Structure formats: C-alpha cells, structure tokens
Image (tube, rainbow, N blue to C red):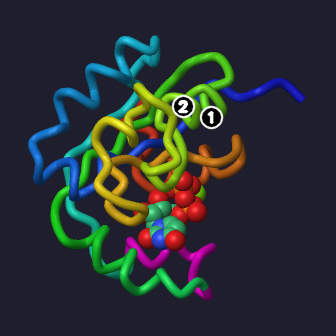
C-alpha cells in the first residue's frame, strides 16, 4: 500500500508557552511540508481524553490530559510524500533524551511528557486525527 501524504501535528502547550510556535513551524517548512490546515486552540478535557483514548490505560494518561489542556496548542495538517514517517523522523523520539540531534524534540522538548510536538503514528490515525481537528471547509 502506498504511504499517505498527510500527517497531523500539534505544537503542544509547553512549546507554545516558550514562544516556539514560529521556530517549530520554520523547521516544518524547511523540511518540505506544506500546511493544509491550521488552528490555534485550547483542547477541552473531553477532547484531550478522546484524542489520546488509545493511551487510556497507561499510567501517564491523566497527567497527559492535564498537560494537553494546560494551555493553547497549534494543530495542523501537513502534506508531504510519506508524511507520517517523514514527520516522525523530523520530530525524533518521544523522549527528547533519545531524540536525534537536530530533531524538533531534541531542540525544543523538555522531557518525555513536555515534548513540544505531536505526530501521527500511521496513515489511518493521521486521517482520524485530521478529521478530529478540522472540518472539510477548514482544509486547503
Ligand atoms: N507520554 C508521557 N509519558 C510517557 C510516554 C508518553 O507523558 O512515558 C506523553 C508524551 O507527551 C507523548 C504522548 O504521551 O508524546 C503520547 O505518547 P506516545 O507513546 O504516543 O508518543 P508519541 O507518539 O507522541 O511519540
Ligand atoms: Mg503516539
């Protein structure tokens, strides 16, 4: 099956608080992603719980929901060939201690929770997450 060409990102509350929206969008642009949709918003508790429902049984779930609702985020749909894999490469490992040099998480993340950005983990989830954040009329 051909790799999909969209992924969903969120610039997380830690990175927004540190005024890193611009630098992170710069890295995304330099890496050749096109922005198909974008919004600046704050997730409700119900939205964060739903977005991360796959992690509901994990010990970090409640803290993750509290963190993701602690301030505004920037959500965006990004387009590039093989977008999911290419974007995971650009952001680096979940824990910034393990993230490769030059990756967004190595540059901007604080720790395994406050890790600056989200990136979809599969084409299927990219589409689910894009629909979660954006109506058809908000996608270009
Ligand atoms: N997370 C956490 N503690 C952990 C693992 C993950 O707080 O031990 C948070 C972190 O913000 C991460 C998110 O939960 O980005 C989702 O976890 P996942 O394993 O899906 O990592 P990702 O796909 O974001 O790299
Ligand atoms: Mg994940």
Circle 1 residues within 10 Å: few <14, some 14–19, many ≥20: many
What residue is drawn where x is 44% and y is 29%?
101
What residue is drawn where x is 38% and y is 72%?
47
Q: Which mark is residue 102?
A: none
Give the side of residue 126 with respect to residue 64, left or right.
right
What residue is drawn where x is 52% and y is 23%?
79
The answer to whether mark 1 and mark 2 are in CB contact below 8 A is yes
Query: Which residue lies under the disc numbered 1?
Result: 84
In this rendering, does residue 109 appear at all? yes
- The answer to if 72 sits in the magenta stretch is no
Picture quarter with the C terminus? top left
Q: Nearer the viewer, residue 53 or 14?
A: 14
The secondary structure type at the circle numbered 2 is: helix
- Single out the residue that lies furthest toward the right: 1
Marks 1/2: CA distance? Answer: 5 Å
The secondary structure type at the circle numbered 1 is: helix
> x, y (%) of residue 127?
61, 45
């Amino acid at each position: 099956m051909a790799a999909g060409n969209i992924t969903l990102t969120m610039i997380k509350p830690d990175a927004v608080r540190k005024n890193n929206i611009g630098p992170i969008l710069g890295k995304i642009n330099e890496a050749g992603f096109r922005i198909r949709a974008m919004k600046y918003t704050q997730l409700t508790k119900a939205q964060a719980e739903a977005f991360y429902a796959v992690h509901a049984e994990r010990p970090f779930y409640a803290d993750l929901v509290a963190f993701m609702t602690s301030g505004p985020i920037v959500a965006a749909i990004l387009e590039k060939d093989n977008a999911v894999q290419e974007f995971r490469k650009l952001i680096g490992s979940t824990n910034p201690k393990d993230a490769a040099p030059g990756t967004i998480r190595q540059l901007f993340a604080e720790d395994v929770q406050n890790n600056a950005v989200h990136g979809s983990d599969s084409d299927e989830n990219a589409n689910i997450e894009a629909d979660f954040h954006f109506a058809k009329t908000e996608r270009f």
